[in-house]
Image (spheres, helix red, strand yellow):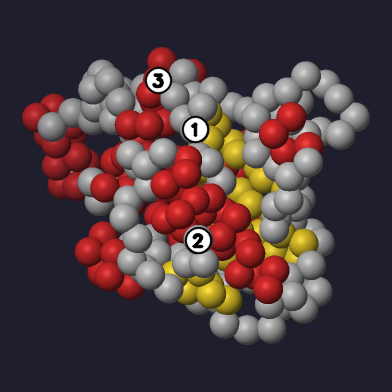
Amino acid sequence: MLRTSIRAAKNIFFPALCFCCETKLSTSQYICDKCRNQIKFLLPPICKLCSTPIKNNKTNLCKNCLNSYYPYNKVICATLYTSTMQKLIHLFKYKHCDYLIKLFSSILTTYLSNIAFTAEDYDFITAVPMHPAKLKERGYNQSALLAHALANYFKKPLKNGIIYETKLRDSQTKLKKEERIKNTTAMFWAKENLTAKKIIVVDDMFTTGSTAQSCCQALKEKGAARITVITLSKAQ
């Protein structure tokens, strides 16, 4: 009874607000229905190597990826990085709002279910790692939280210590494509033999793909047979 009264008083004096538009929420959720409806999901047909929307074709590849090599076999991005996702991911990464993992895991698993993705043939799930210095500063790796959620959802082993970030890099946020590639070249190392392993790599964002390529290249060099990259959002 006392807890109910305290909760009611808290809702009166400190009402829950939408994380995006600060509209008062009537239920215990993070964003209002209007902002939730503004989340744009990436629906087929899309390029299987960069998730760029394409016209229906037999190769499932965009023009840029048609004759390009990537160390991974497929990329799956759940949403477009529009203003709503931008605000939420910024809070998730830089404002200590790690509890938003509840919302993001729901977005990811719902999307993967809708596109009928199954992890049945994969051996384990891992996350794009974070340099120890940056991890100490932030307190958590947002990609590792997403990977943990997917491992629980698919009931697959989680191996987040398998890849290491070998150098402390500058933030990718404001870098151009060429600078991003240079910033992520040869920056990851996989610590064990992965011969014939099928792996899901999880990250929060897919922008130019430079981080995913560098990370997956490290896995390939240790013998990984098939790699699928899954991210929460894709920059337009």
Most extreme residue toward the bottom is 192
Amino acid identity at mark 3: Cys
Question: What is the distance, in whole Å, between disc 3 and disc 1 at their CAs?
Answer: 18 Å
Q: Which residue is mark 2?
A: 185
Label placed on residue 35: 3
Q: Residues within 10 Å of mark 3 (few under 14, many from 20)?
A: some
Percent coordinates x, y for residue 48 in the rendering: 74, 39
User: In front here: 161 or 1?
Assistant: 161
Percent coordinates x, y for residue 120 in the rendering: 79, 59
Percent coordinates x, y for residue 216 in the rendering: 62, 62
Relative to residue 190, is residue 215 depicted above or below? above
Residue at 41% in and 39% down: 176
Q: Which residue is mark 1?
A: 235
Residue at 57% in and 54% down: 212
Amino acid identity at mark 1: Ala
Percent coordinates x, y for residue 43 in the rendering: 68, 26
Relative to residue 51, is residue 185 depicted above or below? below
- Nearer the observer: mark 2 or 3; the answer is 2
Residue at 86% in and 25% down: 57
Assess whether mark 2 and mark 1 are in contact (beta carbons under 8 angstroms). Answer: no
Relative to residue 76, is residue 11 depicted above or below? above
Q: Residues within 10 Å of mark 2 (few under 14, many from 20)?
A: some
Quick one: SS at disc 2? Answer: loop
Name which quarter of the figure residue 153 lies in: bottom right
Question: What is the distance, in whole Å, between disc 1 and disc 2 at their CAs?
Answer: 20 Å
